């Protein structure tokens, strides 16, 4: 069974790029670009790893993450957070919210792939 | 000579009798038994000092010379008392509430406590009264001569007689007139003596009259027959002179210093005026009753050439009635002495208060304080003034040679003092009367009187050259002293009265209207004119014992309980009284006043202590001083308040600046964070796809092409973002150079629409324009304006959510051109409208690709061009309004 990765991101070109890279790894990539409905989507269809952008229309990535951690169904979901705001404060906020891995845009494709692989390996079996 | 000796003895006894009465009255008053001394009867009798020797002797002389004219002298005061008693009542009330001491005090007090006016009126009074005192001395001397050596006049002797009389009068006045310091305290002894003298002179005249009518003329009918037969009955009444004399005597009654003294200063009950208003005219009537019979008898019985002024004496003498003659002599003596005594008191009060004391205080270089030594000085000044005034009268008598008829000297004197009338009446009835007006009126009236009547009265050639009288000074005919302005043939007295009072009143009114009174004058004016509104009935003269406890309470309120107690205890220990409260000694009061002054100001402290200790009424000056101090305190506290407000303002400014800095710092962080995001997002795509192109094998040519063009687009997006950032930075820092040139608005819009259409992003929009309205000539930076238009059209293309987007561009020409951009989309929410002009604010999703700087740049540009761009709500779709001045002006920035 192929592993499933959920990508929540609103920048079309970045969705295309990440989608291309991960599908070449044989992963199934679901994408979603609206912050407000992200949590419902996740609960309904839990992925093995979540890649989450911070600046999203409607709801910030941090809020999505906090809600996710408060929900028993998704509390242990591995989350890789991507942010374009490269300040150390953002990393701290993300860690407090319970992020599993954190990357600053722009990133190297290889590095991003490594992080996803590591998170998949640590992901609990459902 | 035996007769003379008898007369001297009688005179001395009479004088002793008066001394005894005055002394007894003073003693009674001090024991508090003054009630009977202060009856309306005594008040009325004291007014009889109006009847001096002039009226006692001179009335008969006047009747011989001018017929019934002497009656006018009595009619004036009678009319004033009966018809104008309300003026007198007002004068009396003002005199009491203002604690007036003299006519000079009244005038000066009314016109803002002007010392200049006080000195002027004092001089006027002295100059006007001196001949009158001389007149009294002359009459006494003449009457002595009648008894002494028949009709032979010895200059040597008369000089001595007058000097003795003058000295005696001065002594009496000094003893009974200056017992008290406060001029307002009544001279009980003097008033009582005068009342007795009034009775004596009336009794004497009546007795002589009865003797003449029933003893010599054979009863009333006989008397009337003789009168008809005599030349007195032939005198025609000169209407003008009569009117003049009535007016003059009425005016003089109000203005004479001695009358003011008894009428106002010595008055202690307003209701006495009611009695006097009928009793005094009655007295005058009795005094005049037998004047004509005596005159007729004198003309018949005495040899031709006898002095008619002395008929009252010489008629009884010629009939061998020595006793009657002595009584008559005592009547004349009484008339003369009472007038001189009261006049001397009144004048000395003026002289010492308004001339001597101000000079003394100036030279002594000390503030006025009521302590022993100053009191001593005041008494001395008053005593010297009395002696001076009486001696001045004596000198006048000696110099003028005692030649003139009694009544004419009296007339001159009357006309002089009457000059006070306009300022006095104007002062108590007209609030508009001013100090300048009073000065002008008095100066004009006094000058006119002096020039036309007083100086000529010394006789031709003494002060006024004969040539002046005949041809006028320097040949100016209309300045002749007795024919001013060419009016000839008038009686000299009437001439003077008419001119001097006309000039006086006219000058007073005109100068008052032309000048602006000072605050103190206005205040005093109101106090005088509205005296019945401000004051209550007669004052209660209670025992004025200083209330130490009251002082203590007041001091506690001002100094605080502990300080006040310490002050009072310290003083009590110093005085060694044994108790905790000290006696209110002058030293202590002064010290207390100083302490209080430190807190509330000197004037306030003085008024407060005075109020408690003296039961003293607070004077207008005190109130003014208090008001001054209060104003200063208020100004000081206002300054303090202003300072603290200034501090508060500075603090608020600092707080504002601080919060602004904080806000700026937060904004800067947010801005950097935003820039970072905007830069990193396209870079993320670029890096990701460039790595894919580099690393991934087996890409299809389509994929290859697609990814390469993504990289290309994102690079352009990055470049555009950097351009916008730089542009905004330049605009915000004001470093932009505007390229001003003229052009048509339609051309600018054409270019903008074309440029916006050239961008391949966004929907196609139909644009509606109004070519006619766009024919507006602009002189501004057309490229920058075009940039704004491009932005707005591009926004419509990016964000208009209508199925068939449409943009209306409406133009309203004018000095400032208004260009509205209205699309047919859904429009913006209220929150969105608030933020769209902020940097990096984007309302819809990011697919439109802008960084959110466009409208921020537009706003900056329009500010630079002196116009503005704003969101236009309520238009259905999204609408922006651009306002731009047709001609760019530097000032518009």
Image (spheres, grey):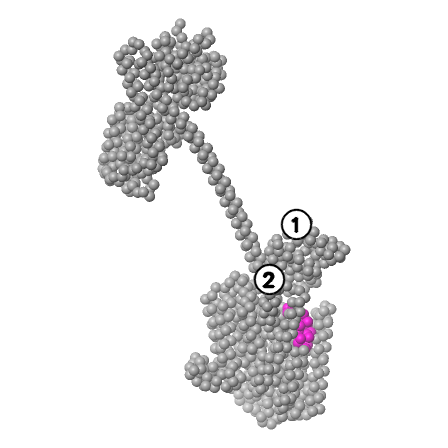
What residue does disc 1 label?
Answer: B560
Residue B35 visible, this orientation: yes
Left or right: where B543 falls relative to B394: right
Examine the rendered structure and indicate whether residue B855 appears above or below residue B153.
Answer: above
Rounded to the nearest angstrom, the CA distance separating label 2 from label 1 is 27 Å
Neighbour class for label 1 at 10 Å: few (<14), some, many (≥20)? few
Residue A121 placement: quadrant: top left
Residue B268 visible, this orientation: no
B320 or B378: which is nearer to us?
B378
Q: Tell us which disc is closer to us: 2 or 1.
A: 1
Dot placed on the residue nearer the N-terminal end, 2 or 1: 1
User: Magenta segment, which residues?
Assistant: B172-194
Examine the rendered structure and indicate whether residue B849 appears above or below residue B287.
Answer: above
Q: Find residue B213 and report its horizontal and vertical position in percent.
A: 64, 88
In magenta segment, residue B126: no
Instruction: Determine the chain carrying the residue at label 1.
Output: B
Residue depicted at 27% across the width and 13% down the height:
B702
Quadrant holding the C terminus of chain B: top left
Left or right: where B611 falls relative to A45: right
Residue depicted at 62% across the width and 70% down the height:
B265
In magenta segment, residue B179: yes
Left or right: where A65 falls relative to B181: left
B374 or B843: which is nearer to us?
B374
The circle drawn on residue B492 is none
Q: Quick check: do tags 2 and 1 share a chain?
A: yes
Q: Residue furthest bottom?
A: B303
Q: Residue furthest top?
A: A1
Q: Secondary structure at mark 2?
A: loop
The circle drawn on residue B619 is 2
Residue B815 placement: quadrant: top left
Examine the rendered structure and indicate whether residue B637 appears above or below residue B858.
Answer: below
């Amino acid at each position: 069974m192929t592993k499933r990765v959920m990508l929540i991101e609103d920048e079309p070109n970045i969705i295309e790029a990440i989608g291309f890279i991960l599908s070449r790894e044989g992963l199934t990539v679901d994408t979603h670009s609206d912050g407000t409905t992200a949590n419902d989507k996740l609960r309904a269809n839990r992925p093995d790893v979540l890649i989450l952008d911070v600046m999203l229309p409607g709801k910030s990535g941090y809020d999505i993450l906090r809600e996710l951690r408060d929900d028993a169904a998704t509390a242990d979901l591995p989350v890789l957070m991507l942010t374009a705001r490269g300040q150390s404060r953002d990393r701290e906020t993300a860690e407090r919210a319970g992020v599993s891995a954190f990357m600053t845009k722009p990133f190297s494709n290889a590095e991003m792939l490594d992080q996803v692989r590591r998170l998949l390996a640590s992901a609990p079996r459902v | 000579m035996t007769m003379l000796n008898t007369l001297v003895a009688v005179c001395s006894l009479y004088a002793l009798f008066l001394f005894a009465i005055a002394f007894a009255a003073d003693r009674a008053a001090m024991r508090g038994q003054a009630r009977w001394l202060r009856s309306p009867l005594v008040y009325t009798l004291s007014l009889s000092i109006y009847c001096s020797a002039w009226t006692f002797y001179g009335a008969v002389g006047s009747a011989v010379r001018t017929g019934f004219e002497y009656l006018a002298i009595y009619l004036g005061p009678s009319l004033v008392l009966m018809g104008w008693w309300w003026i007198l009542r007002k004068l009396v009330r003002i005199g009491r509430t203002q604690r007036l001491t003299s006519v000079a005090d009244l005038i000066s007090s009314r016109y803002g406590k002007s010392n200049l006016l006080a000195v002027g009126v004092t001089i006027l009074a002295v100059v006007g009264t001196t001949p009158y005192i001389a007149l009294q001395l002359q009459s006494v001397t003449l009457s002595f001569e009648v008894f002494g050596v028949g009709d032979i006049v010895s200059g040597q002797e008369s000089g001595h007689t007058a000097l003795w009389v003058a000295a005696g009068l001065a002594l009496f006045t000094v003893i009974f007139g200056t017992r008290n310091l406060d001029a307002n305290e009544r001279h009980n002894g003097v008033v009582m003596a005068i009342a007795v003298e009034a009775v004596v002179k009336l009794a004497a005249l009546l007795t002589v009259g009865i003797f003449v009518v029933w003893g010599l003329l054979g009863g009333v009918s006989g008397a009337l027959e003789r009168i008809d037969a005599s030349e007195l009955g032939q005198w025609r009444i000169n209407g003008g002179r009569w009117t003049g004399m009535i007016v003059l005597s009425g005016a003089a009654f109000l203005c004479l210093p001695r009358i003011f003294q008894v009428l106002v200063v010595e008055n202690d009950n307003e209701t006495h005026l009611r009695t006097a208003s009928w009793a005094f005219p009655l007295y005058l009537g009795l005094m005049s009753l037998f004047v004509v019979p005596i005159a007729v008898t004198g003309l018949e019985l005495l040899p031709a050439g006898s002095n008619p002024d002395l008929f009252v004496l010489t008629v009884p003498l010629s009939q061998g009635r020595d006793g009657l003659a002595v009584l008559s002599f005592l009547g004349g003596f009484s008339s003369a002495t009472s007038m001189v005594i009261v006049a001397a008191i009144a004048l000395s009060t003026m002289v010492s208060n308004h001339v001597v004391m101000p000079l003394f205080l100036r030279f002594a270089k000390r503030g006025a304080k009521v302590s022993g030594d100053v009191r001593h000085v005041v008494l001395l000044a008053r005593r010297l003034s009395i002696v001076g005034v009486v001696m001045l009268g004596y000198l006048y008598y000696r110099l003028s040679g005692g030649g003139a008829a009694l009544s004419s000297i009296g007339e001159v004197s009357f006309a002089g003092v009457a000059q006070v009338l306009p300022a006095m009446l104007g002062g108590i009835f007209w609030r508009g009367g001013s100090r300048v007006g009073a000065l002008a009126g008095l100066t004009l009236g006094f000058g006119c009187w002096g020039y036309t009547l007083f100086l000529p009265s010394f006789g031709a050639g003494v002060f006024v050259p004969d040539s002046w009288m005949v041809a006028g000074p320097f040949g100016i005919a209309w300045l002749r002293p007795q024919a001013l302005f060419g009016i000839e043939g008038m009686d000299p007295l009437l001439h003077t009265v008419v001119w001097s009072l006309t000039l006086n009143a006219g000058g007073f009114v005109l100068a008052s209207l032309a000048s602006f009174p000072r605050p103190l004058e206005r205040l005093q004016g109101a106090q005088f004119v509205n005296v019945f509104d401000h004051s209550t009935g007669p004052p209660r003269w209670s025992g004025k014992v200083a209330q130490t406890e009251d002082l203590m309470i007041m001091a506690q309120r001002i100094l605080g309980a502990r300080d006040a107690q310490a002050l009072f205890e310290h003083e009590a220990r110093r005085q060694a009284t044994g108790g905790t409260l000290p006696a209110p000694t002058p030293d202590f009061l002064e010290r207390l006043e100083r302490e209080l002054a430190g807190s509330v100001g000197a004037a306030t402290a003085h008024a407060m202590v005075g109020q408690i200790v003296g039961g003293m009424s607070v004077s207008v000056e005190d109130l003014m001083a208090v008001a001054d101090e209060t104003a200063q305190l208020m100004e000081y506290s206002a300054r303090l308040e202003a300072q603290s407000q200034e501090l508060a303002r500075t603090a608020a400014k600092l707080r504002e600046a601080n919060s602004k800095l904080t806000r700026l710092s937060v904004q800067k962080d947010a801005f950097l964070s935003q820039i970072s995001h905007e830069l990193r997002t396209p870079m993320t795509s670029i890096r990701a796809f460039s790595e894919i192109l580099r690393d991934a094998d087996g890409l299809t040519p389509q994929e290859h092409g697609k990814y390469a063009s993504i990289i290309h687009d994102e690079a352009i997006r990055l470049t555009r973002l950097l351009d916008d950032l730089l542009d905004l930075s330049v605009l915000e820092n004001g470093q932009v150079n505007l390229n001003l040139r003229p052009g048509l608005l339609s051309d600018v819009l054409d270019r903008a629409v074309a440029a916006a259409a050239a961008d391949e992003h966004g929907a196609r929009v139909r644009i509606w324009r109004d070519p006619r309205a766009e024919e507006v000539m602009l002189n501004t930076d057309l490229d920058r304006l075009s940039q704004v238009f491009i932005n707005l059209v591009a926004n419509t293309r990016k964000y208009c959510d209508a199925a068939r987007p449409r943009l209306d561009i409406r133009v309203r020409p004018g000095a400032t051109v208004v260009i509205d951009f209205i699309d047919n989309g859904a429009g913006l929410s209220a929150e969105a409208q608030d933020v769209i002009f902020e940097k990096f604010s984007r309302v819809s999703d990011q697919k439109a690709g802008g960084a959110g700087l466009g409208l921020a740049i537009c706003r900056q540009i329009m500010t630079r061009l002196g116009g503005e761009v704003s969101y236009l709500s309520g238009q259905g779709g999204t609408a922006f309004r651009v306002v731009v001045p047709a001609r760019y002006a530097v000032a518009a920035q």
